[in-house]
């Protein structure tokens, strides 16, 4: 499982945790997150996230 960082505000999406608030179950891979999904903190597009190691 990987983590992805919003390059604008620093919000982290963790594949292992998912994001219940957005209907993304734990284990939801980044590739399975809809392209229309946006950062819940600042609203930027999924394309503005980078893979990171935490």
Image: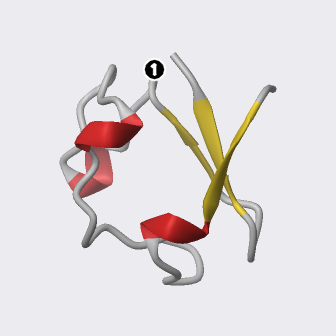
Badge 1 element: loop
* Quadrant in the picture for residue 51: top right
**Residue 48 as seen in the image, left or right of residue 18:** right
Estimate how packed mark 1 is, as few (under 14), some (14 to 19) or many (20 or more) residues with alpha carbons within 10 Å.
some
Q: Is residue 33 above or below residue 42?
A: above
Q: Name the outermost residue toward the right.
A: 54
| Residue visible at 24% across and 40% down in the picture | 32
Residue 8 appears at what percent x and percent y?
74, 76
Q: How many marks?
A: 1
Q: Is residue 40 left or right of residue 53?
A: left
* Residue found at the very far bottom of the displayed protein: 43
Q: Is residue 49 above or below residue 16?
A: below
The image quadrant where one finds the C terminus is: top right
Q: How is the image coloured?
A: secondary structure
Above or below, 18 relative to 35: above
Q: What is the x, y in percent for residue 12?
A: 64, 48
Label 1: which residue?
16
Residue 28 is left or right of residue 43, and the answer is left
Q: Position of residue 27 (x, y in %)?
A: 33, 20
Residue at x 57%, y 74% (from the top left corner):
41
In-image side of 35 versus 49 (left or right): left
Nearer the observer, 25 or 37: 37
Where residue 35 sits in the image (x, y, percent)? 27, 64
Residue at (61, 44) in percent of width and height:
4
């Amino acid at each position: 499982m990987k983590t992805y960082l919003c390059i604008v505000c620093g919000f982290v999406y963790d594949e292992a945790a998912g994001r219940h608030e957005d209907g993304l179950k734990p284990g939801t891979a980044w590739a399975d997150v809809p392209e229309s999904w946006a950062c819940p903190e600042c609203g930027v597009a999924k394309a503005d996230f980078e893979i990171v190691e935490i």
